[in-house]
């Protein structure tokens, strides 16, 4: 930290808070890496700005995307945030693996505090700004389509959630360029993160980024739950919903109840740091054990928040690509609900080693094992779904198979960790790191990529390249095993997590293997970007405008691809589960309706961008003690909310004529399309009309 | 490479050197054996079913609407519940048996040692002998050790993989860990809870000695420099010690003083 520059304006900012200045004065590899990362953020932002200016797309970006309240566009923007943040956090993961591989009895390339920033940002980003936006985006896109609705219950709240997530993610990115991030890990345990031990800006960046993310997720949870409860189309009883809607509902309920403890925990920590409170300090009656309880009361349900939507995705993918009804629908619903409820009863297993009585530990250990039962049931349900089906090994199905076989291994190590006496030995070691990556990579990431591949044609109107999809899948699977299986061994050998250097040379072969795995995982992301590039180039050959490329089962496949803004010209009436699949076989889902009506849709609104930018500014200002900006940002948020409450004209009308034109264009395309048999659905012959074979 | 790989495990619980770690390893083997039966069917069935019912295999009946069977339902719910009940009993008894607070049963009296977590080192106080060490824990083979832990700084966690599991050391609080070594040797101890830039170097040696060697060790440390206020201030400062340090004439109640001091006004 250097002398602050104009404290009244810039708070505690000084020139040495810029990594470029530090690297200029002290050009070590460590500082150069920091400056390079900051440079990439700046260069990326400049590149996007120039691109938008050159192509003259600022206005388009503002009116078509940033101010849009269309749940589909909001969903897509969430996924874009997720991919950007995934790229950053994966680079950080590679840097950490490289550091540990070269820092065996040697200093390596990044300094200890820099390494600590890396694991803190990696974890915070992967959970709050990769997994959460990804699943929120997929849910946002799909749930209204699947329940036969035109939008979510609260479209503006939806956009505000997106923008708050975006501002949290922006704070994470800014921390690369101005100042330093927290070194306290993604869980930010006090008293280490208290001002007495860490007076810098790092923990404050963490606090405000996570606070924004947690508020966004609470709002999203409320929105999704209400949407599913209140917006279902006629006949869509709860037990007729697709499994993805069920898992989304459970996730939403978990968000509503689990995110607030996190918001409370981070805000109490903020009170400690900013106003001298003593919630979690050592002195004056503070107690960090309260923090551990609050944090994990969020933290454990969070595990299921990120995994349940993927379970829904796998249910859809396995059933569609087996051409078969989902096995044991009722039992899957029960299992999902059971997991959601049980997830609130196990948080203490994150700190078995805090010295509580063995009976308490044992009770939470048994509760933890109990979750294994409904989870196991789900895996078998997917196996029986393939049983007597017609399984096509498309990319999403390959992810599903890889998930089932890998996840079960993570489940095993989870049972081992559920035994307190065994947890004592491997807690805080790489065994734990291997375990939760073993759950989250197959459980969340594979699921989200499978969803991206599976529903991409629905969202953009053309299929993704299958070859590159398989290459990416191969990289994610092989890379995972190489990167994380060695960590189980290292953890069993007592290697602690979060260690910048390694003194034990016997760890070398395992660290090398893990490093190779990390590189392959990075290639997996590279392959996904290549796949996107190749698919966009060849999009005209792979159009599926008719909208149903995989012989889908749910209502989302009954619209054009991409769907019109209003989703459904007439709200569907359903009489059974998987209505569209049956409609195709028994009735005429593509018949032209006799008449069309005007449709009311929410108007664009600048409220969400204003709130998002103001909250990012306020968060940034709080980090740097720029009090004037913090007050200004807060006032803007309050004023915007009040002003918005006076706006009456929030709906626009899409005329019946326009609806007719849109629908006619699609239905004509459907009539001209050739029904595609399953054997050749991944070829260019697929125009999005599935052959309805019985 | 491969041989080097197996060497890594020698630092862990696999190569246990005390009764607690031995029991933990034994428990691990039992749990792992049970879990083979849990994972096995999934690992076999997933590829088998997926491949057998592939689209190009027309040999088997295609039943697109089949989606429920009571026998299968019973098969997927009941056995896992049974396994969890069985493992639950094992978990309950083993958690009580291996409670880190439970004193080990032994014919010999336990040695009391107090561990204070500091940045980035461990202070071990032997209150009965009035000696203290930095980053070296000497214990006589066969005698149980009752370790009391606290922290003079942020939360840390003490782990000696070959002897026992870990327990947190928290400021203002006392936790306990009971362990024993059953053979002479030098074992690695460490802090596993990240606590700043010296974290990766916060390791210490646990030296298990024959009783005679242990007595000689005690005699040697009793002759070391006293742990006076100046020495205490210097070890409390953030630093990474280059090697173990030894102190004599430790004032009584030092552990408690450090524990209380960290919660007083003016502390962080």
Image (tube, helix red, strand yellow):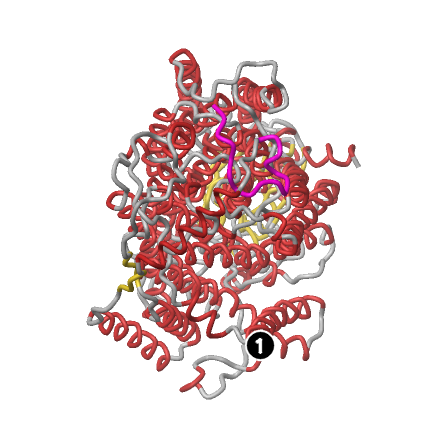
Tell me which corner region of the image, top left, top right, bottom left or bottom right, holds residue A516. top right
Relative to A362, does residue A279 appear above or below in the rendering? below
Q: Single out the residue that lies furthest toward the bottom.
A: A6
Q: Is A372 left or right of A83, judged from the image as shown?
A: left
Q: Chain of mark 1?
A: A
Q: In the drawing, does residue A560 fall left or right of residue A291?
A: right
Rendered view: B187 above or below A231: above
Q: Residue at x 55, y 50 (%)?
A: B122
Residue at the (71%, 74%) spot, across then down: A27
Q: Which residue is mark 1?
A: A18
- In the image, A513 versus A273, the foreground residue is A513
The x and y percentages for residue B239 are: 59, 61
Nearest the viewer among A394 and A250 is A394
- The answer to if A336 sits in the magenta stretch is no
Q: Which residues are magenta?
A: A678-694
Residue A89, position in %: x, y? 57, 56
Tell me if I can see residue A407 in this picture. Answer: yes
Circle 1: is it few (<14), some (14-19), or many (20+) Cα within 10 Å? Answer: many
Q: Is residue A683 magenta?
A: yes
Helix, strand or loop at label 1? It is loop
Where does the image place residue B183, in percent across and percent down from the top left?
A: 64, 28
In which quadrant will I find the N terminus of chain A? bottom right
């Amino acid at each position: 930290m250097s002398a602050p520059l104009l404290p009244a304006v810039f708070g505690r900012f000084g020139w040495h808070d810029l990594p470029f200045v530090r690297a200029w004065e002290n050009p070590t590899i460590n500082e150069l890496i920091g400056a390079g990362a900051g440079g990439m953020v700046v260069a990326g932002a400049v590149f996007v700005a120039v691109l938008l200016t050159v192509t003259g797309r600022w206005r388009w970006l503002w009116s078509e995307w940033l101010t849009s309240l269309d749940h589909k566009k909001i969903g897509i923007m969430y996924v874009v945030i997720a991919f950007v943040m995934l790229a950053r956090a994966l680079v950080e993961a590679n840097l950490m693996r490289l550091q540990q591989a070269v820092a065996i009895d040697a200093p390596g390339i990044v300094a200890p505090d820099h390494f600590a920033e890396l694991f803190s940002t990696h974890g915070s980003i992967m959970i709050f700004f990769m997994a959460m936006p990804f699943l929120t985006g997929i849910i946002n896109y799909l749930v209204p389509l699947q329940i036969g609705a035109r939008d979510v219950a609260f479209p503006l709240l939806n956009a505000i959630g997106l923008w708050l997530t975006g501002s949290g993610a922006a704070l994470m990115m800014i921390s690369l360029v101005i100042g330093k991030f927290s070194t306290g890990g993604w869980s930010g345990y006090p008293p280490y993160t208290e001002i007495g031990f860490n007076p810098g800006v790092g923990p404050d960046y963490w606090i405000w980024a996570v606070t924004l993310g947690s508020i966004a997720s609470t709002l999203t949870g409320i929105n999704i739950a209400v949407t599913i409860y209140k917006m279902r189309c006629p006949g869509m009883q709860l037990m007729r919903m697709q499994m993805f809607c069920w898992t989304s509902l459970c996730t939403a309920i978990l968000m509503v109840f689990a995110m607030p403890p996190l918001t409370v925990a981070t805000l109490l920590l903020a009170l400690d740091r900013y106003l001298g409170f003593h919630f979690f300090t050592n002195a004056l009656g503070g107690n960090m054990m309260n923090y551990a309880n609050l944090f994990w009361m969020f933290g454990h349900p969070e595990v299921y928040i990120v995994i349940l939507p993927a379970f829904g995705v796998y249910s859809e993918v396995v059933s569609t690509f087996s051409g078969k009804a989902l096995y044991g629908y009722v039992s899957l619903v029960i299992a999902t609900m059971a997991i959601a409820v049980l997830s609130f009863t196990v948080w203490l297993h994150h700190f078995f080693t805090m010295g509580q009585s063995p009976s308490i530990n044992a009770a939470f250990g048994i509760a933890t094992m109990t979750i294994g039962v409904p989870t196991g049931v789900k895996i078998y349900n997917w196996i029986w779904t393939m049983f007597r089906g017609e399984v096509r090994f498309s990319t999403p199905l390959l992810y599903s198979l890889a998930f089932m076989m890998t996840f079960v291994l993570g489940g095993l190590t989870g049972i081992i960790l559920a035994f307190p006496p065994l947890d004592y030995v491997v807690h805080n070691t790489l065994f734990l790191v291997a375990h939760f990556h073993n759950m989250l990579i197959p459980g969340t990431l594979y699921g989200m990529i499978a969803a991206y591949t599976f529903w991409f044609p629905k969202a953009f109107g053309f299929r993704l390249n299958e070859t590159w999809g398989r290459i990416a899948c191969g990289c994610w699977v092989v890379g995972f095993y190489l990167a994380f299986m060695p960590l189980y061994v290292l953890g069993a050998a007592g290697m602690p997590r979060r260690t910048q250097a390694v003194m034990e040379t016997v760890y070398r072969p395992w660290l090398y293997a893990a490093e190779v795995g990390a590189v392959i995982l990075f290639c997996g992301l590279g392959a996904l970007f290549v796949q996107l590039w190749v698919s966009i180039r060849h999009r005209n050959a792979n159009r599926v405008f008719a909208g149903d490329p995989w012989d889908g089962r749910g209502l989302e496949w009954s619209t054009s691809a991409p769907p019109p803004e209003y989703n459904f010209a007439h709200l569907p009436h359903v009489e059974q589960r998987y209505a569209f699949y049956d409609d195709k076989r028994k009735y005429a889902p593509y018949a032209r309706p006799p008449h069309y009506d005007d449709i009311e849709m929410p108007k664009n609104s600048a409220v969400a961008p204003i709130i998002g930018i103001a909250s990012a500014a306020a968060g940034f200002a709080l980090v740097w003690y720029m009090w004037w900006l913090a007050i200004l940002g807060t006032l803007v948020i309050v004023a915007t909310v009040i002003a918005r409450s006076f706006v009456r004209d929030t709906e626009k009308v899409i005329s019946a004529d326009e609806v007719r034109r849109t629908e006619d264009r699609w239905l004509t395309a459907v009539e001209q399309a050739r029904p595609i048999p399953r054997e050749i659905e991944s070829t260019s012959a697929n125009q999005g009309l599935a052959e309805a074979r019985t | 490479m491969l041989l080097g790989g197996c060497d890594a495990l020698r630092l862990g619980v696999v190569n246990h050197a005390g009764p607690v770690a031995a029991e933990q390893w034994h428990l691990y083997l039992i749990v792992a054996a049970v879990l083979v039966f849990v994972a096995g069917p999934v690992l076999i069935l997933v590829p088998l079913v997926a491949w057998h019912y592939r689209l190009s295999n027309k040999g088997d009946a295609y039943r697109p609407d089949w989606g429920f069977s009571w026998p299968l339902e019973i098969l997927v719910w009941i056995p896992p519940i049974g396994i969890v009940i069985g493992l639950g009993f094992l978990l309950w008894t083993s958690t009580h048996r291996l409670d880190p607070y439970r004193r080990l049963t032994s014919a010999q009296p336990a040695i009391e040692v107090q561990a204070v977590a500091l940045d980035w080192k461990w202070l071990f106080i032997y209150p009965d002998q009035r000696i203290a060490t930095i980053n070296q824990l000497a214990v006589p083979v066969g005698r149980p050790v009752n370790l009391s832990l606290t922290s003079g700084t942020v939360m840390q966690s003490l782990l000696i993989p070959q002897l026992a599991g870990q327990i947190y050391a928290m400021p203002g609080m006392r936790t306990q860990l009971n362990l024993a070594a059953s053979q002479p040797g030098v074992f690695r101890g460490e802090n596993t809870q990240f606590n700043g830039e010296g974290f990766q170097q916060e390791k210490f040696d646990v030296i298990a000695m024959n009783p005679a060697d242990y007595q000689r060790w005690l005699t040697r440390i009793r002759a070391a420099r006293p742990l006076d206020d100046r020495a205490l201030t210097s070890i409390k400062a953030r630093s990474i010690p280059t090697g173990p340090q030894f102190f004599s004439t430790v004032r009584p109640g030092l552990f408690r003083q450090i524990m209380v001091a960290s919660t007083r006004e003016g502390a962080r």
